Amino acid sequence: MAERIVVTAVGIVSALGTGIDAQLLAMRNGRSGVGKVTHLQSVYATDFVLGEVRMSNDDLAASLGLPTGDNGYTRTSLLSLLAMKDLLDSTDISLLKQEQFAFISANTVGGMCKMEDIYMDVVGPDTEEKNIKYIDTLDCAESTEKIAEHFGLKPLTATISTACSSSSNALMVGARMIKQGIVKRAVCGGGDALSRFTLNGFYTLKNVDKTPSKPFDHNRGGLNIGEAAGFCLIEKESDALARGAKILAVLSGYANTNDAYHVTAPSPNGEGAVRTMQQALTMAGLEPKDIGYINAHGTATANNDLAEGRAIQELFGTQAPPFSSTKPFTGHTLAAAGIIEAIYCIMALQQQMIIPNLNFETRMEELEISPATTLTENTTINHVLSNSFGFGGSNVSLVFSKA
């Protein structure tokens, strides 16, 4: 039997705050981080509610010991750096300097958050020299390199960009590298910052709600965009035990598939989602009845929730385990969604809790199942399933088990 891959440290920043404790406190209080924004500069910003991290760029830079102002760092990089710092606060960084490890980070829009602010200053005849340094930030891998450089690390690096399943795929790549003996450890995750590009792009697709989102609700009106970053340190169980590390959870199963149905819409009958969840369960050696909680992708868009809801009902039946989307707490954080929701699954295992699906009122007429709407603690959960279903039919399901 292959040795188990375990999670031994996490780092997270979202609209709920920085660190696990901030996430847990907000969820226990039913407090959403989605609201009116203060940092995103857009003429449309006041029309929407978004999952914005409440720290300004200067606040983020100061917390990282970086100079404020025009420092060459985009908000995408700053959020990811803060999440990595949160992870390293509970890990001896020398562990990652003793031998080469894998750093697999995810991103979808790179430094667009900065480039759209300075665009007119870099395309005209009077290009300002100070802005040239930001051109390279459009590359999604730039933030990956910035993190390694800032913390003095020299890992094997890769940057994953598969839309909303990006950071879930990053976790899979890291796990596979460990199993193949390429590295002993991997730090996997990713981040995305709010930008006018993403807000306007999703609004053009007519799937953004100007009020708080309502996943799996019959009257859902679309998603709320958010920003976040998160990372997990993973390694073989024997290596974790040998160094006396606390094991937070076991990454017991994973799978990715592709619907090959449409560039933005999932297969409406949910066949791709069913296949992904089933393959992840099979890898974990589990049956559907073994899952105690599902963290659904749940974007509150018409197509996604119908397809995912049908898939959950087909695989688990009308007596499906408690499931919920946590996006009403954070907004849909794009490349970061998979990893922060994986961290929420780990949190659910540790706390033995069901995280509620905020804002739900009316069951979808096409389904016989509804999401959990109240926080439940002191329950019994041994295995959880996390879904991330991205544009282009890029589906990932992760199974985490109690250590």
Image: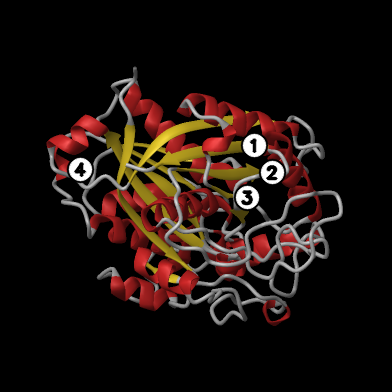
Mark in the foreground, 1 or 3: 3
Number of other residues with Cα within 10 Å of mark 3, as a class: few under 14, some 14 to 19, many 20 or more: many
Which residue appears farthest toward the right when viewing the image? 365
Task: Name the quadrant containing residue 332.
Answer: bottom right
Viewer-proximal residue among 81 and 21: 21
**Mark 4: which secondary structure?**
helix
Mark in the foreground, 3 or 4: 3
Q: Name the residue under label 4.
A: 96
Is label 2 in contact with label 1 (beta carbons under 8 Å)? yes
Question: Residue 163: percent from the left, percent from the top?
Answer: 61, 45
Could you tell me which residue is drawn at 43 percent across and 67 percent down? Answer: 23
Q: How crowded is mark 4: few (under 14 residues within 10 Å), some or many (20 or more)?
A: many
Residue 170 in view in this figure: yes
What separation in Å lies between label 1 and label 3 (alpha carbons)? 12 Å
The one of 285 and 289 positioned closer to us in this rendering: 289
For disc 3, the marked residue is 297
Secondary structure of residue under mark 2: helix
Q: Which amino acid does label 4 sit on?
A: Leu
- For the residues labelled 3 and 4, the Cα–Cα distance comes to 32 Å
The quadrant in which the C terminus is found is top left
Q: Which mark is residue 391?
A: 2
CA gap, disc 3 to disc 2?
A: 12 Å
Q: What residue type is labelled 1?
A: Ser
Q: Position of residue 158 (x, y in %)?
A: 41, 37
Q: In this view, does 191 lie above or below 105?
A: below
Lower position in the chain sequence, tag 3 or tag 4: 4
